[in-house]
Image: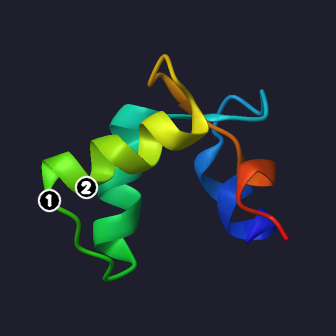
């Protein structure tokens, strides 16, 4: 997951803007409606602005 994340972290700042998340997930075949995606993002970032991969790493 980290290598995939790094491909989309174009600024190399350790996060991906949430606007890119929908495109990334759709490219991977994971289809979410806007509400589902927003809920997922808000679970990881209450401000809803970024996605960090360590949030989902187990």
| Residue at x 23%, y 73% (from the top left corner) | 31
Q: Is residue 9 above or below residue 27?
A: above
How many numbered marks does the figure carry? 2
Report the Cα–Cα distance between label 2 and label 1: 5 Å
Report helix, strand or loop for mark 1: loop
Q: Is residue 1 above or below residue 24?
A: below
Judged from this view, the residue extending furthest toward the bottom is 29
Residue 56: horizontal and vertical position, in percent?
71, 60
Q: Is residue 40 left or right of residue 52?
A: left
Q: Are marks 2 and 1 in contact (CB under 8 Å)?
A: yes
Residue 14: horizontal and vertical position, in percent?
78, 34
Report helix, strand or loop for mark 2: helix
Q: Is residue 18 above or below residue 37?
A: above
Q: Is residue 12 left or right of residue 42?
A: right
Task: Identify the disc placed on residue 36.
Answer: 2
Q: Quadrant of the N terminus?
A: bottom right
Task: Identify the disc placed on residue 33.
Answer: 1
**Disc 1 residue crowd, few under 14, some 14–19, many 20+, Cα 10 Å:** few
Quadrant in which residue 48 is drawn: top left
Q: Is residue 58 left or right of residue 55?
A: right
Residue 58: horizontal and vertical position, in percent?
85, 71
| Residue at x 77%, y 27% (from the top left corner) | 13
* Residue nearer the viewer, 48 or 6: 48
| Residue at x 81%, y 51% (from the top left corner) | 54
| Residue at x 80%, y 64% (from the top left corner) | 57
Residue 46: horizontal and vertical position, in percent?
52, 23
């Amino acid at each position: 997951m980290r290598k995939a994340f790094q491909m989309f972290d174009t600024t190399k700042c350790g996060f991906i803007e949430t606007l890119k998340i929908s495109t990334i997930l759709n490219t991977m075949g994971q289809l979410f409606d806007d509400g589902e995606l927003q809920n997922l993002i808000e679970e990881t970032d209450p401000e809803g602005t970024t996605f960090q991969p360590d949030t989902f790493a187990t």
